[in-house]
Image (cartoon, rainbow, N blue to C red):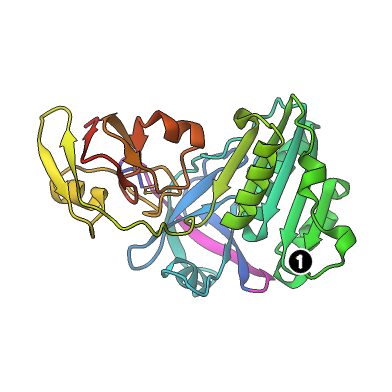
Amino acid sequence: MRPNDPLTEAEITDIQDEAENVRAFQLAACSGGLAPFTAGAHVDVHLPGGLVRQYSLFGDPDAHEDYRIAVLREPASRGGSAAMHALKPGDRLRISPPRNLFPLDETADKTLLFAGGIGITPILAMARRLHNLGRCFELHYCARSPARAAFLDRLAQAPFSADIFTHFDDGDASQKLNTHDLLAKPQAGTHLYVCGPGGFMAHLLSTAQEAGWDEAQLHREYFSAQEATDQENQPFDIEIASTGQVLTVPADVTAWRVLDQAGFAVPVSCEQGICGTCLLGVKSGTPEHRDSYLTDEERAMNDQFTPCCSRSKTKRLVLDL
Ligand code: FES
């Protein structure tokens, strides 16, 4: 979380089971109103026990209604999704103002939206917004089966249902997503948005990249950490550019933890390299990027890194602190 973000006390006004292990929550401000949000935005939800998790807002950005989030209960939950699924209507939570790390280019000639599983949440808000604007778009929604796909009823009733294509792993071959055909010809003015599991996103993005789509046309949001690297951690030093202070990051400790213990209040939220909250500038040295937040182009510039999970390829990283 950003330390200066004012938190809003919100009450859960409704909970709906949307699919196997997926629950949708409606949140209303306990006093005052909720800040408007843009398609692709998320809120940080502060859970009992001190956990903080990010959930995308799937409602209509133009409707000025309560916030709506949906949570997949992960079997390997680190506590966040299990804590969310234990909540009841009337329970209260503190939430951050909406933040958008997955913004929609509303001027694109055409937009291709791809959602895998619970990745449908920000994509649904984007579809609503594009429909409201009268823009041309297609939404491709992939899930293992209809039973595991949230929002099928809502999508079937949406005024843009004709622009939605569902693809189920357990369905027949004719309805499977054919990324090679869809992405074969890069089109100027078309933007592509992807949210879903790591493998799904990697497949779509690499197909688009191999077909020659420009990186500026490709937009992504990860909702869980990419697969852990099998590289062995090495200790490295971080130097504080403003003072010359040098701190050693042991192999089994994150750079963020070392900074925190040395008194540097670097904001943190997901602690998995997804949200970008902890991003720091790098003055020299080469980070070993282990996040899902930076694009390939941003990584190649080596001028910023996520201390919650990333490490260093060089013996020393000089940080813009
Ligand atoms: Fe989310 Fe580091 S805290 S990327």
Give the residue number, with chain letter if any, for mark 1: 169
Whether residue 63 appears in this view of the structure is no
State whether label 1 is within 8 Å of ligand 1: no
Q: Is 267 situated left or right of 270 in this image?
A: left
Seen at 33% across and 68% down, the residue is 49
Neighbourhood count class around disc 1 (C-alpha, 10 Å): few under 14, some 14–19, many 20 upward: some
Q: Looking at the image, is 192 positioned above or below residue 166?
A: above
Q: Is 277 situated left or right of 103 in this image?
A: left
Residue 103 falls inside the magenta stretch = no
Count of marks, rendered view:
1
Q: Position of residue 212 (x, y in %)?
A: 69, 32
**Closest to the observer, 80 or 10:** 80
Q: Is 175 situated left or right of 201 in this image?
A: right
Q: Looking at the image, is 282 positioned above or below residue 120?
A: above
Dominant secondary structure of the magenta stretch? strand
Q: Position of residue 155 (x, y in %)?
A: 79, 55
**Closest to the observer, 227 or 11:** 227
Q: Position of residue 224 (x, y in %)?
A: 50, 57
Residue 62 position by quadrant: top right
Seen at 64% across and 55% down, the residue is 200
Residue range highlighted in magenta: 4-20
